Each structure stands twice: as C-alpha cells, then as structure tokens.
C-alpha cells in the first residue's frame, strides 16, 4: 500500500469517487473538478464558484479515446485531437447522453479537452470518470495558476487541492466550436494559424472573441467583467503614452518604455516573448491587485499567436480608455 503522503493524488481520487470536488493542476490554469456524470456533483461546482448555471463546463478526459463516450466525434475533431491533444484545446461537439444537462447548461453540445498535465490525467484515469472542471476561481475573478491562488480564492476550501506547481501555459484553453463552420469561441495557446494547419484554413474568431469586430469602445459599460482584479484596470493602447500619477500600478509587456519612478510594475516578458507573458499574466495581475493601487494600467500586447488570448483576457478585465 502506498502511503498517502507519497501519493499526492490519493485524497483527490477519493473525493472524486465519493462525488465530491477536488482542485487539480492543468497546463493552462487550475481547475475545480468533479465527476461529470453526477448532476449533484456538477451543481456543487457551480455553487462553489458562484457561477451562473447558464455557463457550461468543460469535460476533461484522460485520453482522446474517451471522447466517443461523451460526444459525437467527427473526422475533423479526431484529426484535431490527434494533432493537439493532450493540450490546451477544448472542442465543442454534439454531446451524448452520458453527460447530464447541468454540465452543458442544457445545450446539446459539450466542450471536451484532454489536459497536458500528468497529475490531471492521472487523476481522471484513477477516478475512472470524465471530470467537469471550470477554472478554480470564483466567478468573474482571475483564474488561478498556482495552488496558492486556489487557496486564496477558497480560504475555507473543504476539498483537496493537488499542487502541481505553476501552470506552464497560464491562460485558459482555446475553445473551438465544431458544430457548423469551425469558430474560435475563446482564444488560447493553440492559435487560429495552428488550427488552420489541420482545418485547411484558420477558423474565424466568434464576434465575442474578436475585439476588432466587437470593439469594446462601442459599448464600454457592457464589457463582460471577467478575469477581473478588484482594482479598476484601464488598458493602454499600443503606442499611447503611459499615464502617470499617484496610486497607479503598471502591467507592461516588455517594460522598455515605462516612465521612470512609476508605481508598482509587473513586466511580463522583457524579451517580448508572448508565451512567457501568458505564463506570467494572471500571477502578475494578482500581485498588482494586492499592491494597494487605486488603478492599474495594463498594456495590450501584439495581436498575434497567444497574444490574442492575452489581449482577450485583458480586455475582459478592464476598460479601454485614453487615460
Ligand atoms: O483551460 C481551461 O479550459 C480551464 C482548465 C481548468 O481546463 N478550464 C476553463 O473552464 O477555463 P471555464 O469553465 O472557466 O471556461 C469554460 C469555457 C466557458 O467560456 C464556456 O462558456 C465554454 O468554455 N464552453 C464550455 N462548454 C461549452 C459549450 N458546450 N458550448 C460553448 N461554449 C462552451
Ligand atoms: Mg473560468
């Protein structure tokens, strides 16, 4: 018998098997997981997060072979799984009845993904169930990229939190709908260009994910408040001057053009590496949020590759204004 101390997953496996919750690391962000086939467990996930029940959950699998049990897998979907799984790509597919309504918010589609993290895949395999898992944060707040972030969000957590260290990718998975024409519902680490190598051409971004179409400045008060720190956050457009004044905190991409002697600063990647910036994004936002500023200024990054995902999260966290 393996002793519990040497088996970091034992408590989580037991919790999931008993129909309770467990927080698990993935390569993107930490998830709050439960047995996707038990409606009562899935309801508890929504309740724990204060998440509205109309926002469907992603079903996590240990391997692509398990997808047939929860969704109708087309040849295109299979080709995408072969290329990108395990990895940060969620596919929205027609669902099968093994997945209860509460997981999909009543939709006849289901989001499925196979995470690229050994602890997550071992947990799913040992639990013997597909796991419904949203990001392990309270609804509308910044997603956790360390186990400590999960503790911060749930100080009274009555569920095991599996510590897998800092998440490698740092932003949530790309969500690709394969119901009609392929559409990216949420940009992530798997880019439209990479998807295009399998699909034949890059998929379009859904209007809600494409800020060039759905320009936030056209409806400033109606931005979905998501991924938000508590401190008000204002976006700095590329090339615009950095605002200065007391009480400001700065989230910079490369940090090379910051004015001297400003307030608290987080630089995402001095070398301009977008993947490094994505990995650091949420932890940097949390540190700035805890720095006692009256307002945060965040710089948008180039809209290429994973930069699309970074800008998507920043735009959801803040408002775009000139000052
Ligand atoms: O990287 C990730 O995807 C993380 C880790 C834990 O796997 N999970 C995550 O879950 O970000 P969550 O619940 O925070 O975000 C799931 C997103 C939501 O935007 C939801 O609307 C969308 O996926 N989604 C899930 N099922 C869907 C469906 N059937 N149709 C359309 N969108 C769906
Ligand atoms: Mg989330």
Image (cartoon, rainbow, N blue to C red):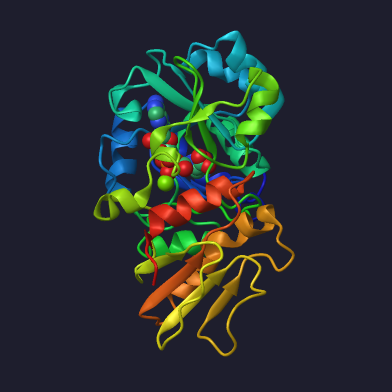
What is the x, y in percent for residue 70?
Answer: 47, 17
What is the x, y in percent for residue 278?
Answer: 61, 55
Residue at the image point whose x is 53% and y is 59% from the top: 300
Res 227 quadrant in image: bottom left
95, above or below 158, in the image:
above
Residue 85 in sight from this viewpoint? no
Residue 197 in sight from this viewpoint? yes
What is the x, y in percent for residue 157?
Answer: 38, 58
Left or right, 218 with respect to 72, comes to: left
Residue at the image point whose x is 65% and y is 25% from the top: 196
Seen from the viewer's position, the closer of residues 241 and 205 is 241
What is the x, y in percent for residue 58?
Answer: 45, 33
How many marks the image carries: the answer is 0
Seen from the viewer's position, the closer of residues 170 and 234 is 234
Residue at the image point whose x is 55% and y is 78% from the top: 265
Seen from the viewer's position, the closer of residues 302 and 306 is 302
218, above or below 129, in the image:
below
Q: Quadrant of the C terminus?
A: bottom left
**Residue lying furthest right:** 271
Res 208 quadrant in image: top left
Q: Quadrant of the N terminus?
A: top right
Seen from the viewer's position, the closer of residues 246 and 153 is 246
Residue at the image point whose x is 58% and y is 57% from the top: 301
């Amino acid at each position: 018998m393996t002793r519990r101390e040497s088996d970091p997953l034992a408590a989580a496996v037991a919790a999931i098997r008993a129909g309770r919750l467990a927080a698990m690391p993935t390569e993107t962000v930490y998830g709050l997981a439960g047995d996707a086939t038990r409606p009562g467990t899935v309801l508890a996930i929504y309740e724990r997060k204060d998440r509205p029940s109309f926002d469907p959950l992603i079903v996590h699998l240990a391997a692509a072979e398990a997808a047939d049990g929860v969704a109708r897998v087309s040849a295109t979907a299979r080709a995408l799984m072969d290329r990108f799984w395990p990895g940060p790509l969620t596919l929205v597919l027609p669902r099968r009845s093994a997945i209860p309504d509460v997981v999909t918010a009543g939709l006849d589609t289901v989001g499925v993904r196979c995470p690229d993290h050994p602890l997550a895949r071992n947990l799913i395999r040992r639990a013997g169930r597909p796991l419904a898992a949203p990001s392990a944060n309270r609804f509308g707040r910044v997603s956790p990229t360390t186990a400590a972030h999960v503790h911060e969000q749930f100080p009274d957590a009555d569920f095991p939190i599996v510590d897998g260290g800092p998440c490698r990718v740092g932003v949530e998975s790309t969500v690709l709908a394969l119901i009609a024409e392929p559409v990216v519902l949420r940009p992530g680490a798997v880019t439209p260009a990479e998807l295009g190598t399998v699909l034949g051409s890059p998929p379009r971004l859904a209007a809600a994910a494409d800020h060039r179409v759905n320009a936030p400045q056209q409806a400033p008060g109606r931005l979905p408040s998501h991924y938000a720190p508590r401190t008000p956050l204002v976006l700095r457009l590329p090339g615009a001057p950095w605002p200065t004044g007391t009480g400001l905190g700065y989230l910079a991409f490369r940090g090379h053009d910051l004015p001297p002697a400003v307030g608290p600063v987080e630089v995402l990647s001095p070398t301009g590496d977008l993947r490094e910036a994505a990995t650091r994004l949420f932890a940097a936002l949390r540190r700035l949020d805890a720095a006692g500023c009256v307002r945060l200024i965040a710089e948008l990054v180039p809209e290429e590759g994973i930069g699309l995902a970074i800008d998507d999260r920043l735009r959801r966290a803040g408002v775009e204004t000139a000052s």
